[in-house]
Amino acid sequence: MRPPFLLGYGTNGFGDHPLHTALDVLDDVGYDAVALTLGFPHLDPFAPGAPTEVAAVRAHLRRMRGGTGAAAVIETGTRYLLDPLHKHRPTLVDRDATLRMRYLERAIEVAQETDARCVSFFSGILPEDAAPADGWARLRDRLPELVRYAGERGVRLSIEPEPGMLVETVADALRLLAEVGEPRELGVTVDVGHCLVVEPDGVEGALRAAAPYLSNVQLDDMPSSHHEHRPFGEGEIDLPHVLATLADIGYTGVAAVELPRHSHDAPRLARASRTALLRAWADVVGAPEGAPVSERSAS
């Protein structure tokens, strides 16, 4: 029995492969979806040949899964695309966010052209010269423009809480959504590994709180002590519990493996990750019918 959500893998974990080769590998492994990070080394949305490349990616996605097509989400966590000296800068909480806004607009355009489920983005780390209130005001005031741009193109945005960033927890993301009027074009991304580090109610609490707005899920293992993406089995995540919770809240979107620092071992980890996910799901569905999530995850 397949899970009700779509299992995917992030291209930021295939940095040593050309993009189309990475897509072929993921298709061969059997993934339902791709989390496509825009930027080095794969698809620079500002490159002169970007429109042609986006069209080729769209065609490639449609050929996958025996011609039935793979789902996609657009990820925007590329590190040095906008500033070669400062990772992720500028962000939406910097004084000048012009480049970040244009990058996110391009991401929205790529999502429209590839029929992606959403564009996932983060707030950014608060700059040293700004107070939290300043960063929050910048983020809150800039979001409506992005939401409008996305809405005009039929694209959904999804804010991802990140450890150490201004929007760090699901509660922060929900506060932001409330302050901008909960537009239907804006949802929440949850990285389950992050939940071990920053969420007071753990993975299940974060997923249940985000459930009405959940647009994108990232899967990885992680220690509870610090933010470090690890392959399944090398951290403290309870994978059956995660998958059971996703099923229990009715999530049907993309849940993609996020291993951005493991490109050196990408093909093996893509296979191993899918095997781990299917085994964890088998544990869930093998539990007694109607058992609560805590019992199902213990099977």
Image (cartoon, rainbow, N blue to C red):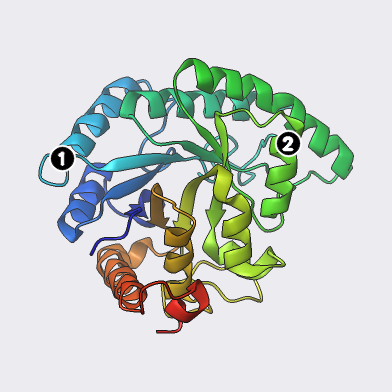
- For badge 2, the amino acid type reads Ala
Q: Which residue is mark 2?
A: 178
Q: Residue at 19% across / 52% down in the picture?
A: 27
Rendered location of residue 254, percent (x, y): 39, 49
Tell me the element at label 1: loop
Q: Which residue is mark 1?
A: 68
Residue 267 is marked as: none
Please tell me whether residue 99 is drawn above or below residue 65 in the rendered image. Answer: above
Q: Residue at 84% across / 46% down in the picture?
A: 128
Labels 2 and 1: the sequence-earlier one: 1
* Quadrant where the image shows the C terminus: bottom left
Q: Dot 1 surroundings within 10 Å: few (below 14), some, or many (20 or more)?
A: few
Q: Residue at 32% across / 21% down in the picture?
A: 51
Please tell me whether residue 142 is drawn above or below residue 63 in the rendered image. Answer: above
Tell me the element at label 2: helix
Q: Residue furthest bottom?
A: 299
